Amino acid sequence: MSKKLKSLIIMGLIISALTVAGLSVYAASTSNTTSNTQENMKIRKGHAEKNMDFSSFVSQGIIDQATADKMKDFMKQFKIDRMSKMESMKSMTEEERKAFFENNKAEFDPFSQMVSQGIITQDQADAIKASMPEKRKSRCKFDLSDMVKQGVIDQETADKIKAYMNQK
């Protein structure tokens, strides 16, 4: 065999190997996208379940543990239903969406639905709603102190933000 033929065969093998490697990388990256989407959904689901912790309301005496468990089950279904409604709204115009929200306000309020289904009383719903802004403020305080420690903002700015939040 001549040197020219050998070099052509070697070049052909190198090009074939690079093509196969490139296709493998592409296939792996596209299947990764699906697993990444599934991973993100698991993270979001975990985050949502974390936000459905009603133990503080139990410890405050607003509800009992059985009611908290019912509320958690309700909220899981409520979020599924809300996502399907949001999916159906994608094809609506802005005006249609506004009208839809206006006509279906109660469907997007989990507390009114829990009251109408007998999971909680109106007094319990009001007490839970009243305690929720306090939870947000305490979370904000925690986040601000971390930001001051990290040097993102100074203490004076954090104090101004706290003062503003306390006005609301």
Image (cartoon, grey):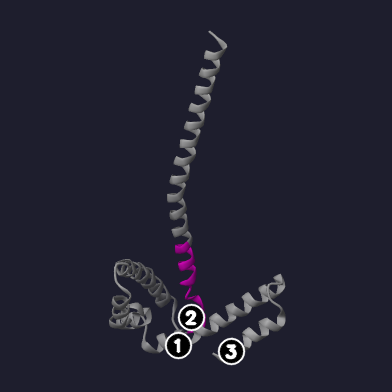
- Tag 2 secondary structure: helix
Magenta residues? 44-61
Left or right: where 155 falls relative to 6: right
Q: Where is residue 121 in the image (x, y as percent from the top left)?
A: 36, 86
Amino acid residing under circle 3: Asn
Q: Relative to 126, is 135 on the left or the right?
A: right
| Side (left or right) of 39 relative to 83 | right
Q: Can you identify the residue that label 3 sits on?
A: 166
| Label 1: how many Cα within 10 Å (few below 14, some 14–19, many 20+) | some
Which of the 4 image quadrants contains residue 146?
bottom right
Decide which of tag 1 and tag 2 comes sooner along the chain: 2
Q: Distance between the residues labelled 1 and 2?
A: 9 Å
Q: Which of 37 and 22 is in front in this view?
A: 22
| Residue tagged 2 | 57
Counting from the top left corner in percent of width and height, residue 14 is at 53, 25
Q: Do the residues labelled 1 and 2 touch (CB within 8 Å)?
A: yes
Mark 3 and mark 2 lie on one chain; the one further toward the N terminus is 2
Res. 139 image quadrant: bottom right
User: Residue 149 or 138: which is nearer the viewer?
Assistant: 149
Residue 150: percent from the left, percent from the top?
A: 70, 70
Q: Is the magenta region chiefly helix, strand or loop?
A: helix
How many C-alpha atoms fall within 10 Å of the one at disc 3: few (<14), some, or many (≥20)? few
The image position of residue 5, as x and y in percent, is: 52, 13
Disc 1 marks which residue? Answer: 127
**Closer to the camera: disc 1 or disc 3?**
3
Measured in 3D between alpha carbons, the distance from the residue under mark 1 to the one under mark 3, in whole angstroms, is 19 Å
Residue sitting at x 42%, y 50%: 34
